[in-house]
Image (cartoon, rainbow, N blue to C red):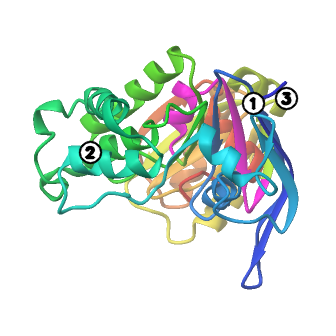
Amino acid sequence: MPLLTAHNLHKRYNGIHAVRGISFEIAEGEIYSLLGPNGAGKTTTIGMLTTLLAPTEGEAEIGGFSVTRQPHKVKEIIGVVPQEIALYDDLTAAENLRFWGRMYGLRGNALQKRVAEALDLAQLTERADDKVGTYSGGMQRRLNIAVGLLNRPQILFLDEPTVGIDPQSRRRILDTVLELNRQGLAVLYTTHYMEEAQELSHRIGIIDQGQLIAEGTLEELIRTTDVRESVVLSLDAPPEDPAALCAALEALPGVEKAASPDANLILEVEAANAALPRLLPRLSALGHRVRRIELREPNLEAVFLHLTGRALRD
């Protein structure tokens, strides 16, 4: 029996159909990533699964409990790490943890033990008595995750936990997620970073415009979408009309799809060695100079481009 099952979840509010019939399952001990751009419906989906938002239609069960009919039971077995930092700047790390621990119903020695464990996990024991307002963004993110683990949940919801932090802090958070999973914790992880989903996930759900358009392991996604090799061309300047340039290149034999984030061109091709002799003269004739060429084997970015017709950063 899956630990989490979502059935045909919809959410409409303020005239917006934010989530459109999402269904998926998460097994015990699995990391499942929802990958999609900002505004795709990831946070709204987590809101419904964690009982913060009532679904307009559909249902979900976690640990056998309904999120709509048994929300208190669901809250007892989940941990939630929201995208926004849920900490008090004028309290120390230890005080924040004790506050949230009491909200979970922890008291006495059990509370002190869990606070000490959470500080150790976040690698903040030496800064336990410093106010959170003095912490870096990465330290606050790590403490935010520690709060979500105080009740020893069966599944942890992480909503874009690495947004806006430095690379070193990001690496620590990813390593923490992997270690928690090695200890048996299931994780629902939302991100718009391809490399995070590719590194962390047992399975990936690709979400776009409120719909889950594909899911599976990375290998399954590559196989079922039949993505090709990719050629990434760095131009000397961003094109004035990216859509027109992509259309012109897609007209060439062997070029399946094209996208133009920033000053780059990402092209899905049948065979790079056959496509490049056509691409480079065409770009030159259109007034573009190529500074760098990169060839990529089929990956998650190629899958997303194939499914949506655009790069994730568009």
Q: Nearer the viewer, mark 3 or mark 1?
A: 1
Q: Quickly name the residue at label 2.
A: 138
Kindly give the residue lying farthest to the top in the view shown. Answer: 182
First reached walking from the N terminus: tag 3 or tag 1: 1
| Label 1 residue SS | loop
The residue lying toward the viewer, choosing from 281 and 245, is 245
| Label 3 residue SS | helix
Tell me the kind of residue under disc 3.
Answer: Thr
Kindly give the residue lying farthest to the bottom in the view shown. Answer: 14
Q: CB under 8 Å between callouts 3 and 2? A: no
Q: Which mark is residue 79?
A: none
Is 268 on the left-hand or right-hand side of 111?
Answer: right
Specify the segment rendered in magenta: 193-211
Q: CA distance from mark 2 to mark 1?
A: 30 Å
Kindly give the residue lying farthest to the front in the view shown. Answer: 108
How many neighbours does mark 1 have within 10 angstroms: few (below 14), some (14-19), or many (20 or more)? some
Residue pictured at 51% horizontal, 52% vertical: 284
The residue lying toward the viewer, choosing from 37 and 237, is 37
Q: CB under 8 Å between callouts 3 and 1? A: no
Residue pictured at 12% horizontal, 39% vertical: 127
Q: Quickly name the residue at label 1.
A: 3
Q: Which mark is residue 224?
A: 3
- Horizontal and vertical percent position of residue 53: 68, 65
Residue pictured at 79% horizontal, 57% vertical: 68
Is 302 on the left-hand or right-hand side of 3?
Answer: left
- Horizontal and vertical percent position of residue 66: 81, 48
Q: CA distance from mark 3 to mark 1?
A: 26 Å
Residue pictured at 49% horizontal, 61% vertical: 287
Q: Does residue 248 lie above or below 265 as drawn?
A: below
Q: Quadrant for residue 38, please give it.
A: bottom right
Q: Nearer the viewer, mark 3 or mark 2?
A: 2
- Horizontal and vertical percent position of residue 288: 47, 57
